[in-house]
Amino acid sequence: MAQHITRFFQIGARSLRESPKGPQSVPRPNSPGDGRRGPVDVTLLTVVGCLVSIGLVTVYSASAFDLYFSRGPDAQFHFFHRQAQGALLGALALLVASRVDYDLYRRHVYLILAAAFFLLCLTHVPGIGITWNGAARWIQLGPMRLQPAEFAKIAFVVFLAYSVSKKGQAMSRFAEAFISHAIVLAPFVFVLLLQPDLGSAVILCVLAGLLVFIGGARWSFLIGFGAAGLLLVTTAIQGASYRMDRVEAWLDPWAEAGTRGYQLVNSYVAFAQGGLTGTGFGEGSGRMGFVPELLNDFVAASIAEEFGLLGIVTLIVLYIVFVWRGTTIALRARDAFGTYLAFGLTALIALQALVNLGVVTGTLPTKGLTLPFVSYGRTSLILLLFAVGILINIGQANPNLHEERRAAREQARREQALRAKEGRVEDRRRAKRRRAAEGP
Amino acid sequence: MRRGISTGRMQTVVLFMLAGFIVVAFRAQYLSVTVADEHLARGAWRTVSVVDVEGPRGGIVDRDGRPLAESVLAYSLILDPRHFFLHERDRLPALERIVAGRGRLDPDRLAAWATAEVASLPRSFIVERQVPPIEAEQLMADLRAERVSALYLMPEYRRVYPQRTLAGHTVGFTQHLGGQGLAGMERTFDADLQGRRLSWTVERDISRRPFLRDEAPDLASAAGHTVVLTLDIPLQRHVERELARTVAEYEAESGVVIVSRPGTGEILAMASWPPVDPNRGQREPQDAWLHPAVARVYEPGSTAKSFTFAMAFERSIIDHDTEIDTANGRLRVGGHWVRDIRREPSLPAWRAMALSSNIASLRIGMEIPAADFRAGLVDFGFGARPGTGLPGESAGLLRRTPWRDIEHANIAFGHGYAASPLQLHMATAAIANGGVRMRPWLVRSVVDTAGEPVHEFGPETAVRVVSREAAEQTTRTLIAATRGDGTGVRAAIPGFAVAGKTGTGELFNPETGQYEEDVLASFAGFAPAESPEVVVTVQILRPNRDIGYFGGVVAAPLFSRVTAEALRTLGVFPDPPAADPSAAGRPPSRDGAIAGTAEPPDQPAPSDADVLDQLAEGQGPVVFDAPRPRGSMRVPDLLGLPAWQAVARATDEGWDVELEGAGRVASQQPPPGERTPEPGTLVLLLTGDHDSPQGAAPESRAEVGP
């Protein structure tokens, strides 16, 4: 199986093994790498496949009941079909992304960033932007309805990876590490808060902090980053009464179970009803409309009810495996940009999963973030799978990394040995000189 | 540090994420297991609620299980206006087209809702109740085609009375065709008939609509008990038809006929005209529901002379042939003139009864002290409720002693006190039963859904009124009244000795204090006189005086027809022309003829004298059990029976059956009661499957919910 998948991604690729002219014969134009492609990370693909499948099943289970009664028996697959559509398009996006060398994004980083910002701004343009539940988060492009924030997050990760990798050692300087990123981050956060979409804004800030941290910024800068972020979040929460409500409802949902704590209480009851092994597929009561946003933010409640603690733990294990694979890819990347990009995308997905599960279990205050790959939403699913494609591309880009590393380590050891030898020679010379100096 | 990347920092970040995931996993474990029970208990209100549901009301059936009242599945049509105007506002034309005008949903109301604030609209509005299942399903299909989901159905039960007006007064009706019983047996046995209440844990969806789960209780199994009456529907139908004929013929205002068995007091038919339709329930005028047989009282008139005579026989004041001075038909009592039709100087006792002499009756009545007379009437059941269990039973009016002479005289010939037709009937039955008054027996049993009896009722003796001898002597005078020039000669039935008394009572108008010209024409009697099998009372109110007036003219022929049919129903047949003396030893025939214990008489049609001699000699009844002549094979009455029961009955009697349709027998060919030489093919037309409340319930589930 793994071999088939690997081969599928290699069809047409200039493979080391398949090229008759040898590895070095066809260098990839404009590519810093040698154009050879390594094996696909099958574990990563399997994990993502599992998550998407769980999402499809849950979306059906959580929506079919309501659809059946509100639109008739023929409509019960409505959301399932749309999600499946997203999964298919996402698979296509994944394939394309895995075949396009990620260096392309580095070269067009500002174009991507500008496009993302432009799309974000479009949400406020009447006629294109769509406001729902008091939030202007969507834009209508022809038949498609997009959520530009999803795209903005990936674009921003691309920018961060580019910026941090370019600065390299300069990251230790405050201006480079902090101010330059803050200048780009600020308008994004501003537009997102206007929507308002605090969740996405916080995710962007945390991502920026993470990459800058890994990039080698000084702790003092990070404390500044953290303080700024905290300030931002507290003002945002205090600035909007509904956010304050959410925090209060989070602290004691049962106190206001009928109103503000309603969503969380229903999530708790879903967990309780699920127990260890769940009520079984299609047997949850959440589908009857008790958990608001069951398809989106609270899809994990449905999983907890129908598949129990076992289902939730499975979900968590899948995300942990995802983080492991993503980090491995990041560490083995061909260049610094690849490392930062891979790690940034991994962190983006993992953080959203973590925050979402934290919210659903009441560990974190209620925040409108979806569960990656699982929650209903075509735009989100397509873009997430596109991001996985990028990860796979990074993972495939330099299969010789181990050998190169070994060679590099060998080289270093040799150099050190040489230096040590030279040192010994020097020592002898010095000793000679000293003896000569001391000698009478 | 390779190319500026800190592997260590990356690992730190990953470790933090891992820690976060582990925290979430523990939190999930806490929610799913540790505090699950507490949360379930605290959160139960959102989905679960306990509702009381009620099984269908039990049926009311006749002695053979033919339904008089039953419950069928129906639906309430409920609209959720808030949901509709929030999500489906654009489908208003479709809703209007399909539903508007039904029940309480008029276009004005819809228009008012359409302009109102959505949040102020109600969550549920009962559009129409008791929608038949087929109609409801069609309606829902139409609505679904238009993508209107704001209407839904709630199953309930609807009361139907398949026999329509038949025994309508006795059956009664319920509130809203299925609620509390408000009249008749529906009221008397309301507690038994009511479906059992079940506590049902119902899951509700976000809109608080009950969402019926698979574990829904089987409502049909919670059905109320069934009340089994003593009535016999075929006989009841015949009696009602005959009564309607007589009332029409004499252009009377109303009429009552009661048929019962003297030995047990069980009432086989209790017909009244004008009829009421329980299906119309409260739409019938309020006083139409007063049961004419038990709730309305009249002066019994001459029919009550038999009681005076019985009391006199009991006290040996007179004998069969005692000459009574009838004063040439005119007698002044207490300043009032009492008249007889026939001006006779004197009459023997039996002739006085036959000619219905008021003067003779008052003369012998006056011989009995008022207190004794009153006690005697009370023993006959006057002045007390008969105790059928029917609501609104009247005790009648019976003055306390002391009586003035004219009061005493009036009461002696049946005036000056009032009784319901049933009281008169039961008193007559006491004479037929050898002087023992039985309580009226209208309800055989109350059985549960499995057919096990919950309450059982049987014949109940009230009191011995007069001795057997006095009753038999009275019977002899009553036979005379239906013979020769007796007033009740039109009550005679060929082949039987009939005992009975006519009555033509002028109606007392309490408003004017005067007697009207209109009369109550009545006849109370029984047959066969020698061994009474059936007692019949007929009362026709206000016949058109130009057409008929006397009880002997108006009521007696109806008595004759009804009694003849009742005897046929009971399998009592007149003596055959040449009976085989050995017939006595034969076992009773299958179709339930009354088993006789007497020797078959030598004479084909015993004369009065023969009968009376036999009675005197204590030989018992003259009726005997003869095999039915082949020519008198009667087509069974299968009307109203469920198909399987009808087939079972018909094939039992040797008929071939052809069925058309499904459900209950609506009509049959040949018609019931027709005589045929031998069984042939019986064609049954079936309609309307009323008896499948179970089975419909699971289907209904799909219609319920958001």
Image: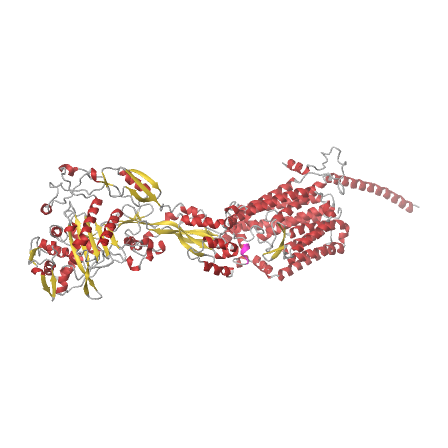
Would residue A338 be counted in the magenta stretch? no
Q: Is most of the magenta stretch helix, strand or loop?
A: helix
Q: Which segment is the magenta one?
A: A260-264
- Tell me: residue B398, above or below residue B483: below
- Image spot of residue B423 (x, y percent): 20, 56
Q: Residue furthest right?
A: A440
Would residue A261 be counted in the magenta stretch? yes
- Image spot of residue A39 (x, y percent): 68, 38
- Image spot of residue A269 (x, y percent): 52, 52
Q: Is residue B381 visible?
A: no
- Image spot of residue A66 (x, y percent): 51, 50
Query: Which of these two is toward me, B135 or B466?
Result: B135
- Is B457 on the left or on the right of A309, as rendered? left
Quadrant of res B383: bottom left
Quadrant of res A45: top right
- Is B486 on the left or on the right of A180, as rendered? left
Q: Is residue B362 visible?
A: yes
- Is A36 on the left or on the right of B690, as rendered? right
